[in-house]
Amino acid sequence: MTQKELLRDGKAIIGFELGSTRIKATLIGPDGTPLASGAYGWENKLVEGIWSYDLEEVWSGSSACFDDLAANVKKEYDLPLERVAALGVSGMMHGYLALDSAGEILVPFRTWRNNITSDASTQLSEIFDFPIPQRWSIAHLFQAILNGEEHVSRISSIMTLAGYVHWKLTDERSTGINDASGMFPVDPETGNYYEGMLDAFDREARKQGLSWTIRNLLPRIVPAGERAGSLTDEGARMLDRSGRLQAGIPLCPPEGDAGTGMIATNSIRPRTGNVSAGTSVFAMIVLEKALAHNHPEIDIVVTPGGKAVAMVHSNNCTSDSDAWIGLFGEAAKALGSPVSADTLYGKLLPLALEGDPDAGGLVSCGYISGEHITGFSEGRPLFVRCPESNFSLPNFLRSHLFASLCALRTGLDTLFDKEKVKVDEIRGHGGFFKTPGVGQRIMAAATNAPVCVLKTAGEGGPWGMALLAAYMVRENRSLGLPDFLDHVFGADAGEAVDPDPTDVEGFNAYFRRHTAALAVERAAVEAIPAK
């Protein structure tokens, strides 16, 4: 069938992803071929010390994204977007959405970016004998209990952003296994929440006089490939304000953006790994065996196919360097030579490869928000140099790119050096890799591992989500998820960049300097109050 015939006959598939800076949608054919896309830009807000998104914008942004997708389909194929074979929703993992029995939100959405659950994280990690990061939904819930927050007794369910949107579209309170594993620990052997940990949490909740059980608050886990609901009439209207989109479309289990990143890079088998780098950065290494010890800087989640994964997640990546690039754009405009963002990145970032291996003695810390790996609940972006430092534009840019990966490197050192975890290749995706060659080389220096960017990596999370929806409606039902992805990706192995020894040595020197400079960052947080 031609692409137009696929669309006309309702055989195309949509993947949505509510990311940290954009809500994106990708329309694909059953074989994974991208057909059209749509997007809507948004930003989180710091409201009374809490990083959050307005839930009204979740829906205005999602419908604007769908409108953009439908407009592009009309422009490219001269067809309305009325029906598809399947649909899937993904979103930022973790965070805290607490709802009452009427489905009303009890407190503003608390995102993954908040580092306000230190006590809960520490206590639950001891109770469960399992690392519970501050970002996880269960840490947010337990911290609310410890804080004595009034809403806790009225909670009927807790959700992630992806699970919340899926519930609104289908009236089904369910989620995929990867997204679930960022809410509460999931046992890869059973594909469900750890029973003993559920019991342990309920014992702690009862000590606080709470009558609900955590089993009733958490969403049901639906395996990849199974149907997790259908688009209701109300859900269709929430997504498509024009009223053309037909109800009844099957939805696959919603997933986290970490899971869709693994799918979009075909890294769900043991010894495969991927790194998603943009506003935040996280590396996912699929394990051959369980880690020997628990480490607070290492999350244990699972792939959408149910395999255990070691995840190193840093809250801060490119936000500070993006701000500096924006400042250079303002300077160019003030000088009468305005340039586009693409030109700024395309011209400036390659200069980082011309800098001194260790960035000339410069050091920056791009902590826009807190950073759990290094023990910060707040951030103050800063840049420091010594009088004798080689203060040049290439070194300045190299310093900021290096700094964006230092927290990640802290966690990877634990994984590779202490736990001896092996990875054959790291596959990259996200805005960090948008400028050809630059992100790959910097990442290879930071990880001391080959870094590959697939030809399809630019399609990103919504494409990965669409692939999971396509897997649900696949014709060959005996085909497992890893083999299905191999079939989709075919020969798209990409070209790996091996770590350059000079770059690796330079990054190591920079990393030591950056680690020492965290004392300056800590002093900045203490001395300069947030608004």
Image (spheres, helix red, strand yellow):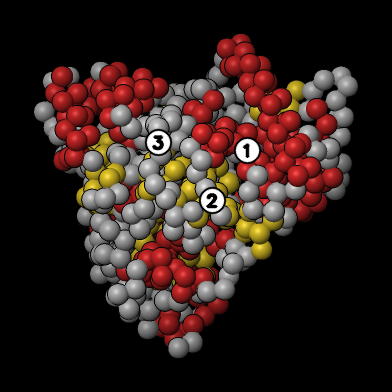
Front residue (pair 190, 90)? 190
Q: Vertically, is 484 above or below 325?
A: below
Looking at the rendered structure, the secondary structure element under dot 3 is loop
Residues marked 1 and 2 touching at CB (< 8 Å): no
Density class for disc 1 (Cα within 10 Å; few <14, some 14-19, many ≥20) is: many
Residue labelled with disc 2:
423
Residue 461 pos. (x, y %): 48, 57
Sooner in the amino-acid sequence: mark 1 or mark 2: 1
For the point 68% across and 30% down, the residue is 511
Q: Marks 2 and 3: which is nearer the front? A: 3
Residue labelled with disc 1:
405
Determine if residue 400 is in view.
Answer: no
* Location of the N terminus (image quadrant): bottom left
Residue 209 pos. (x, y %): 13, 20
Sooner in the amino-acid sequence: mark 1 or mark 3: 3
Residue labelled with disc 3:
292
Instruction: Tell me the kind of residue under disc 1.
Output: Leu
Residue 235 pos. (x, y %): 29, 59
Looking at the rendered structure, the secondary structure element under dot 1 is loop
Q: Marks 1 and 3: which is nearer the front? A: 3
